[in-house]
Image: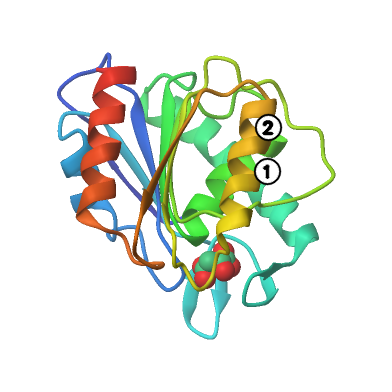
């Protein structure tokens, strides 16, 4: 997969797995990662799916309706890519924390729903429920930060609540943070995520 790897100054910190939103690329979230923890290593990936010239991490049938078969396939592909990258770049595969926005947050959630121990934690900005009716692996010790907008036109508030519940039922210590905004990423949720990261991983 197309990507950027940047080794951080502090090897004990988790490697941040950066996953952009629809139409983004592997450069999009570098500045955001810097705001969360500038000394962490970064593996920033570009989605392999091309939707009318826009990069995504998995196909969708229409806005908000996922192609489940592709989602499952692409989630496995991303998980294997992280495995290979850990060997290639020498970072600890067991210490990877996702930082995703929108479509990227959705595939980060999908990694947690489908692959045990894929992630040590995650910051999910404006994520949806990636899949329903599956048993989520145990997420004890896998903290998740969810940033959401109360007026997000793409993600109804009860869907975010369902995601929080799903993760909690799998034993993840979830922190949900709500803004009065929509689908856009707001400074206040980035600040809250930074504080959450410091508390959990620094
Ligand atoms: C998705 O398809 O993953 C969500 O609708 C968010 C997005 O538009 O990327």
Residue extending furthest toward the right: 133
Residue contact between numbered discs 1 and 2, judged by CB atoms under 8 Å: yes
Q: Quadrant of residue 40?
A: top left
Q: Quadrant of residue 202?
A: top left
Residue 110 coordinates in the image, percent (x, y): 64, 45
Between 181 and 125, the one nearer to me in the picture: 181
**Residue 21 appears left or right of 154:** left
Taking the spot 69% from the left edge, 27% from the top edge, the residue there is 169
Between 33 and 27, the one nearer to me in the picture: 33
Between 14 and 165, the one nearer to me in the picture: 165
Mark seen at residue 115: 2
| Vertical placement of residue 86 versus 75, above or below | above
Taking the spot 42% from the left edge, 31% from the top edge, the residue there is 97
Q: Nearer the viewer, mark 1 or mark 2?
A: 2
Q: Is residue 6 visible?
A: no
**Residue 83 appears left or right of 150:** right
Q: Is residue 139 visible?
A: yes
Residue 76 coordinates in the image, percent (x, y): 68, 43
Query: In this figure, which residue is indicated by the disc labeled 1?
Result: 76
Taking the spot 20% from the left edge, 54% from the top edge, the residue there is 187
**Residue 83 appears left or right of 71:** left
Secondary structure under tag 1 reads helix
Indicate the colouring scheme: rainbow
Q: Quadrant of residue 138?
A: top right
Residue 178 coordinates in the image, percent (x, y): 39, 49
Say whether mark 2 is within 8 Å of ligand 1.
no
Taking the spot 39% from the left edge, 68% from the top edge, the residue there is 182
Q: Earlier in the sequence, mark 1 or mark 2?
A: 1
Secondary structure under tag 2 reads loop
Mark seen at residue 154: none
Q: Residues within 10 Å of mark 1 (few under 14, many from 20)?
A: some
Ligand 1 occupies quarter? bottom right
């Amino acid at each position: 997969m197309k990507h950027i790897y940047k080794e951080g100054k502090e090897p004990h910190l988790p490697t941040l797995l950066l996953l952009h939103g629809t139409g983004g690329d592997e450069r999009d979230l570098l500045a955001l990662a810097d705001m969360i923890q500038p000394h962490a290593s970064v593996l920033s990936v570009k989605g392999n799916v091309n939707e009318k010239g826009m990069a995504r991490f998995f196909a969708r049938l229409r806005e908000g309706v996922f192609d489940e078969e592709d989602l499952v396939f692409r989630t496995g592909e991303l998980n294997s890519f992280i495995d290979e990258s850990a060997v290639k770049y020498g970072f600890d595969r067991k210490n990877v924390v996702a930082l995703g926005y929108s479509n990227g947050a959705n595939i980060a959630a999908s990694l947690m729903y489908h692959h045990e121990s894929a992630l040590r934690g995650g910051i999910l900005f404006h994520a949806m429920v990636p899949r329903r009716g599956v048993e989520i692996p145990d997420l004890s010790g896998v903290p998740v930060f969810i940033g959401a907008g109360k007026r997000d036109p793409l993600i109804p508030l009860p869907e975010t609540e369902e995601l929080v519940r799903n993760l909690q039922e799998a034993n993840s210590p979830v922190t949900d943070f709500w803004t009065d905004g929509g689908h856009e990423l707001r400074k206040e949720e980035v600040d809250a995520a930074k504080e959450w990261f410091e508390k959990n991983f620094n």
